[in-house]
Image (cartoon, grey):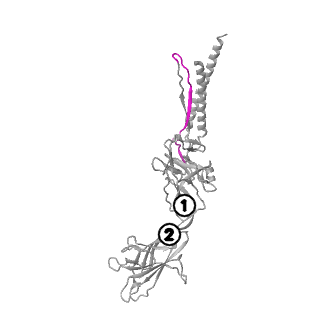
Amino acid sequence: MTISSSLNASVAGLRANASRLATISDNISNSSTYGYKRVVTDFHSMVIESGQGTYSAGGVRTTTSRLVDERGALVSTSNPTDLAVRGRGMLPVTSETSVAVNNGENPLFLTTTGSFRPDAQGYLRTPGGMVLLGVPAAVDGTIPNYPRDSIDGLVPVQINANQFAGEATTRVDLSVNLPATSTREGSAGEIETLTVEYFDNLGASSNLGITFTPTVPATGASNEWTMEIRDSESDVDLNGIPDIVGIYTLTFDDSRGGGGTLASVVNVGPGGAYDPVTGALTIAVDGGPMDINIGELGSSIGLTQLSDAFAPVSISKNGTPVGSMTSIEIDENGYVRASFDIGINRVLYQIPLVDVPNVNGLEALDQQSYRVTPDSGTFFLWDAGDGPTGDIVSYAREESATDVAGELTELIQTQRAYSSNAKVIQTVDEMLQETTNIKR
């Protein structure tokens, strides 16, 4: 029995070291594979109950585990959508097969790095077929609330290289000086005109026509103007003149301390009321409401009435015309930002980081991807840099976690252990032969 147990133990030793050799060979062969996590083989002794004065060899058995929590060094690349996670957390991805089916059911896989590039449909995918998942931004670039313990809020990240963008004008700041001499007795009452370009909801150029008509008194100075605002996109009358969208009576201060500044603004027609706190009035253009900032009461910024010259000092506004996308980048918090040739940036998606309690309990799949299992625990979606997670590094890849020198050292140990077990089998064979020879 003892000799037979020695034979069985040695056979188990051969099998165990063969398993260790397999993990070592896998690690070495993937020493240049980005994002590869090395596999280790652990040996466990098996004890068989023995009688007094005898001992039976139980042998050895092995377990293998992938050390997902070990991270490789980050190396820089020239692709802005080459991503790596610095610290805890993993990128959410799915298979290109499920995206192609397009039934809304995309399985969740995890990876720590990937070289994502747009495919023919614009989906960011790796050469191995892993498609990046993210949360789509709202029209204004904000990220809506989404479930953190489910993938219901995640969609494949799709970048359209021919994408266009424009921003509607919602605010205009006017800084204009009106001639004080026009509101004095005997003045010709010359009407001053101003045209302000704005961009509608479709990015097209439109105009606001603003006229300032002075009130000429019989004697003295009125310091009063009537401001009319017309929208080029509104309805026109029989003469082809756009309808008025705002009429306001402007009165200016002529005192020594605040001379030339606005004293009062009265709404006498269409248009919203003037807000003396913000210095803005609201008009309804064809695409929706627009704020016109003419300055606070008593302020020298905005509309003024000084001297004898009409001078548009400054006209500024938000909004942009339609522009083409020129580049795409992903920042450390996972925001996917598109840059356009009109000088604006827009958030398209946010890439969350997935975290599980036991990353080494994840199931390893092809292409350095992993799947959540009962051993790993349930996942949670964090904003990159929030909670326990690290941040996302673009223009970077994570190298293999394999230490070739250490693997070669273990290879020598495995070879020696395998040879030793084989020698034990040879010795047992010789001892059994001697036992057979006793009968002779």
Task: Give percent across and percent down for residue 157.
Answer: 57, 55
**Magenta residue check for 65:** yes
For the point 56% across and 22% down, the residue is 57
Residues in magenta, as a range: 51-75
Residue labelled with disc 2? 169
Label 1 Cα neighbours within 10 Å, binned few <14 / some 14-19 / many ≥20: some
Viewer-nearest residue: 185 or 208: 208
For the view shown, which residue lies furthest in the left direction? 256
Residue type, label 2: Thr
Please give left or right for residue 254 compared with residue 422 in the image: left
Label 2 Cα neighbours within 10 Å, binned few <14 / some 14-19 / many ≥20: many
Asked if residue 165 is positioned above or below residue 432 in the image, the reply reads below
**Most frequent secondary structure within the magenta stretch:** loop
Residue type, label 1: Ser
Task: Give percent across and percent down for residue 138.
Answer: 51, 60
Q: Is residue 179 visible?
A: no
The C terminus, quarter of image: top right
For the point 55% across and 20% down, the residue is 56
Residue labelled with disc 1? 339
The N terminus, quarter of image: top right
Please give left or right for residue 219 compared with residue 418 in the image: left
Asked if residue 385 is positioned above or below residue 231 in the image, the reply reads above
Asked if residue 77 is positioned above or below residue 208 in the image, the reply reads above
